[in-house]
């Protein structure tokens, strides 16, 4: 008895054409996603059983969220803990954590805007709404792509430590968006001062020590004291740079410095928004002062000034514009082998505030 073997049939050409179109479309979508959100993992989510599921590293969340910011609101509250939220709710508004105030003021603005703009898609955020979801998304990015450091999370929960910890979170999220991995040092080691973390470029293996510095101001972001008049807000940032440099990490050094200026005052410090950027006299003086104190050489490899003034906005106005400027050292004692990598890292600062609105489609 003879057995018959089936013959293999070649799929018709249109199958290959459709496959090529499918993969080309997916590649284009991925390129668009990374241009907008950086070199981070895509949202891992799926709809099933009437629920939206979202995976964040090794945790799985599910709920009835229509938009991705709805999930971010839940995620932030979950990571900070129900006890923390209940304590904040019992406090007077003036004593609450900045996050709690941002959420309350942002939701109030959103509810009013939805009513006034009935029939129009989306709501352009005010400063508090942008601050809350910008922070929540950075928290998600760091937790999903690197695992949120427990010590940083505890600092973020404390009202008086929040400003500095929040800027460190921004710096870490920026490095992850630029395609770096992040490693936190053992701060319990008393033998030397530690930088915030070490960032390693995944393509070139360039290792960079990262410092995040934020200018505290009286009466702003839960700091004690009364706010000063806007035209008296100072431009003293050299001390923060010197403090970062003094840690002497023995690696190329990137410093992210939050100037924390009111929007109109920032215009005077950063100069006009032109291309290419023209540094103001104030910026030039700071760079010259730092270089002079370092013996005529730049003691850093990358210095990024940012101003994200969400918290200076009013309840009834749109989110104030942001500013940033970066300097790559030309003469430094610890050279980095790739200026292009540092430029890419600096430009990743621009991606802050790009928060996805929709969940990915089920595939």
Image (cartoon, grey):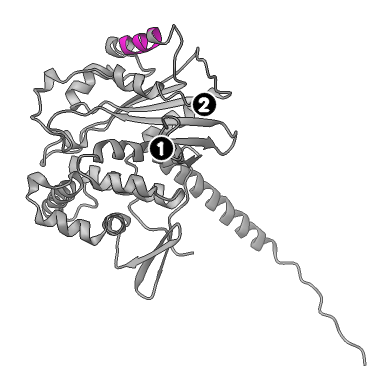
Q: Which of the 4 quarters of the picture holds residue 85?
A: bottom left
Residue 115 horizontal/vertical position (percent): 11, 55
The stretch of residues the image draws in magenta is: 285-292
Residue behind mark 1: 174
From where the camera sits, is residue 338 visible? Answer: yes
Q: Is residue 48 above or below residue 158?
A: below
Q: Is residue 7 above or below residue 41?
A: below
Q: Nearer the viewer, mark 1 or mark 2?
A: 2
The residue positioned 38% from the left and 76% from the top of the image is 49
Q: Which residue is mark 2?
A: 251
Residue 287 in magenta stretch:
yes
Where residue 217 sits in the image (x, y, percent)?
17, 28
Residue 197 figure quarter: top left
Q: Nearer the viewer, residue 112 or 289?
A: 289
Q: At 46% across and 52% down in the image, what residue appears?
A: 42
CA gap between label 1 and label 2 equals 19 Å
Kindly identify the residue that appears in the image at 50 percent across and 48 percent down. 30
Q: State the mark number for residue 262.
A: none
Would you place residue 22 above or below residue 348 in this image?
Answer: below
Along the polypeptide, which appears first: circle 1 or circle 2? 1
- 205 falls in the magenta region: no
98 sits left or right of 144 in the view: left
Which secondary structure lies at badge 2? loop
């Amino acid at each position: 008895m003879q057995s018959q073997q089936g013959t293999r049939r070649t799929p018709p050409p249109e199958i290959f054409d459709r496959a090529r179109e499918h993969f080309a479309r997916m590649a284009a979508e991925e390129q668009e996603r990374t241009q907008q959100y950086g070199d981070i993992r895509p949202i891992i989510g799926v709809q099933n059983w009437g629920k939206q599921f979202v995976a964040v590293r090794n945790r799985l969340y599910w709920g009835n969220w229509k938009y991705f910011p709805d999930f971010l609101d839940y995620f932030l509250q979950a990571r900070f803990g129900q006890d923390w939220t209940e304590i904040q709710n019992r406090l007077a508004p003036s004593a609450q954590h900045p996050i709690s105030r941002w959420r309350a003021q942002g939701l109030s603005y959103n509810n009013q805007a939805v009513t006034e703009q009935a029939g129009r898609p989306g709501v352009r955020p005010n400063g508090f709404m942008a601050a809350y979801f910008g922070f929540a998304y950075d928290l998600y990015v760091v937790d999903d792509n690197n695992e949120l450091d427990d010590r940083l999370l505890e600092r973020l929960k404390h009202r008086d430590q929040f400003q500095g910890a929040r800027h460190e979170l921004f710096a870490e999220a920026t490095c992850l968006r630029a395609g770096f991995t992040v490693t936190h040092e053992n701060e319990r080691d008393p033998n030397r001062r530690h930088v915030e973390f070490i960032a390693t470029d995944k393509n070139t293996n360039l290792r960079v020590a990262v410092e995040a510095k934020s200018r505290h101001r009286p009466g702003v972001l839960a700091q004690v004291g009364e706010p000063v008049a806007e035209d008296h807000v100072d431009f003293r940032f050299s001390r923060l740079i010197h403090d970062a440099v003094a840690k002497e990490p023995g690696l190329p050094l990137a410093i992210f410095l939050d100037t924390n200026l009111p929007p109109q005052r920032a215009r005077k410090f950063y100069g006009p928004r032109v291309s290419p950027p023209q540094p103001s006299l104030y910026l030039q003086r700071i760079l010259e002062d730092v270089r002079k104190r370092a013996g005529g050489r730049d003691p850093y490899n990358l210095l990024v000034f940012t101003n994200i003034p969400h918290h200076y906005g009013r309840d009834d106005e749109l989110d104030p514009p942001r500013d940033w400027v970066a300097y790559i050292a030309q003469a430094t004692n610890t050279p980095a082998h790739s200026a292009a990598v540092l430029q890419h890292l600096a430009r990743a600062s621009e991606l802050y505030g790009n928060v996805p609105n929709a969940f990915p489609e089920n595939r």
